[in-house]
Image (tube, grey):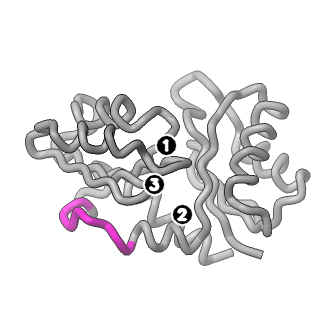
Amino acid sequence: MARQIALLRGINLAARNRISMPDLRRALAEAGYDDVATLVQSGNIVLTSAKEPKTLEREISKLVLDEFGVTSATVVRTRDELAETIERNPIPEGPSTPKLFQVTFFPEQPDPGGVARLAEQDFGREEVVVIGREAYAWHPDGIQRSKLARELGRRLGDGGTARNWNTVTKLLELADAG
């Protein structure tokens, strides 16, 4: 069975969509998933399952709604897919500021027209590169006031979920440890 990484979108943001990670781990284990672990409080799950990623996306989103009353899209990558995402990092300076370097994971490859419109914009020192189902974005002046961060969702769709580089690399470490 494969190690898989499930990323929940939009949970535990301030006071909305609150889910306890111990309760989430328990619910996933009771649903039959093995070796369930979570990282921080923002819906980063590593588990073992023979199911296909698309099946996990549907099942985990349904479980979160049924158990916790929270609607949350789920994006799943296998351990190997996550390792490839890290290996193909197209912005070498990004990891030097890992909290300001993000990868947005999409369930499907973003629309090429949206990618082209995003590439046409001037974001100053910020950079974005879309490869497959991931968008790599470097925000050297911060994320809170980032024009690029706002445009990513507008141009590429709102089905993605972003994680900073620290989280991405720690998820791979957690997948390898289990």
Q: Earlier in the sequence, mark 1 or mark 3?
A: 3
Query: Is disc 1 placed on a helix, strand or loop?
Result: strand
Magenta segment boundaries in residue numbering: 87-94
> Where residue 143 appears, x then y in whole percent?
28, 37
| Secondary structure mostly seen in the magenta stretch | loop
Q: Mark 3 points at which residue?
A: 133
Gap between marks 3 and 2, in whole Å? 18 Å
> Where residue 14 appears, x then y in whole percent?
52, 26
Q: Identify residue type, mark 1.
A: Thr
Label 2–label 1 contact, CB within 8 A: no
Gap between marks 1 and 3, in whole Å? 11 Å
Q: Give me the residue at 69% from left, 48% from top.
A: 57
Query: Is disc 2 placed on a helix, strand or loop?
Result: helix
Q: Earlier in the sequence, mark 3 or mark 2?
A: 3
For the N terminus, the quadrant is bottom right
Q: Give me the residue at 59% from left, 71% from top.
A: 79
Q: Identify residue type, mark 3.
A: Arg
Q: Which of 48 and 20 is in front in this view?
A: 48
The label on residue 171 is 2
**Res. 9 image quadrant:** top right
The label on residue 161 is 1
Compared to residue 127, the image places residue 114 above or below, namely above
> Where residue 84 appears, x then y in whole percent?
45, 72
Q: How crowded is mark 2: few (under 14 residues within 10 Å), some or many (20 or more)?
A: many
In reply to whether residue 92 is colored magenta, the answer given is: yes
